[in-house]
Image (cartoon, rainbow, N blue to C red):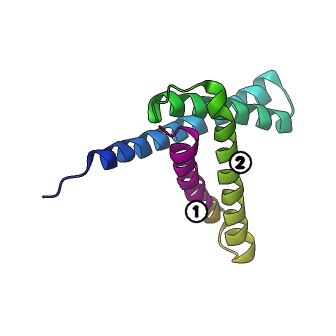
């Protein structure tokens, strides 16, 4: 049998936590959108923006405190977090666009593939840039 190095174990657990936070964020973002749009009755565009802010806030807090266990100053980490989000999102969108509109792959498959890119870049960027130890 082989033994996994402690640093690899930590990274594997961080990846699992990061994905769990992502699932929670998706749920929170979708529920926030539904509440703001259908109950509060704010237009769909503003509801979308607000719900993404709510989801990103949740993502920042859970990934900072739970996934990466960072205790650094909030201000020092929020800007890099937003930068990582923007880069990961743009890469996701570009990959999606390439697959769906250039290669003519089914939109849902392209969207899923783009989200894999988004998740990988988000994890790597946050581990090495935002919440580095």
- Mark 1 lies on residue: 113
Specify few, some or many for label 1: CA neighbours under 10 Å numbering under 14, 14-19, or 20 or more. some
Which quadrant of the structure image shows residue 72?
top right
Q: Is residue 119 magenta?
A: yes
Q: Look at the picture and state if 36 lies above or below 11.
A: above
36 or 71, which lies in front?
71
18 on left or right of 74: left
- Residue under the image location 47 percent in, 37 percent down: 133
Q: Quadrant of residue 117?
A: bottom right
Q: Is residue 72 visible?
A: yes
Against 5, is 110 above or below? below
* Residue to which mark 2 is pinned: 86
Of residue 64 and residue 19, the one placed in the foreground of this image is 64
Q: Position of residue 73 (x, y in %)?
A: 59, 25
Q: Secondary structure at mark 2?
A: helix
Answer above or below: position of 21 versus 117.
Answer: above
Residue 31, can we see it? Answer: no
Secondary structure category for the residue under label 1: helix
Residue 32 locus on image (x, y percent): 69, 29
List x then y, in percent, for residue 31.
65, 31
Q: Could you tell me which residue is drawn at 26 percent across and 50 percent down?
A: 5
Magenta part of the chain: 112-132
* Cα–Cα gap, marks 1 and 2: 17 Å
Q: Is residue 16 within the magenta segment?
A: no
Q: Which residue: 87% across, 33% down? A: 43
- Would you place residue 126 above or below residue 88 in this image? above
Q: Which residue is found at the position 72% from the left and 32% from the top?
A: 53
Which mark is on residue 64?
none
């Amino acid at each position: 049998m082989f033994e996994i190095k402690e640093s690899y174990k930590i990274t594997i657990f961080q990846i699992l936590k990061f994905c769990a936070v992502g699932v929670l964020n998706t749920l929170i973002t979708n529920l926030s959108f539904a509440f703001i749009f259908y109950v509060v009755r704010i237009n769909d565009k503003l509801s979308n923006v607000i719900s993404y802010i709510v989801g990103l806030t949740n993502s920042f807090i859970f990934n900072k405190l739970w996934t990466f266990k960072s205790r650094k100053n909030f201000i020092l980490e929020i800007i890099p977090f937003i930068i990582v989000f923007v880069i990961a999102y743009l890469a996701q969108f570009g990959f999606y666009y390439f697959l769906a509109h250039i290669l003519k792959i089914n939109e849902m498959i392209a969207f899923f593939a783009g989200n894999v890119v988004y998740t990988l870049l988000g994890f790597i960027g946050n581990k090495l840039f935002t919440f580095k130890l």
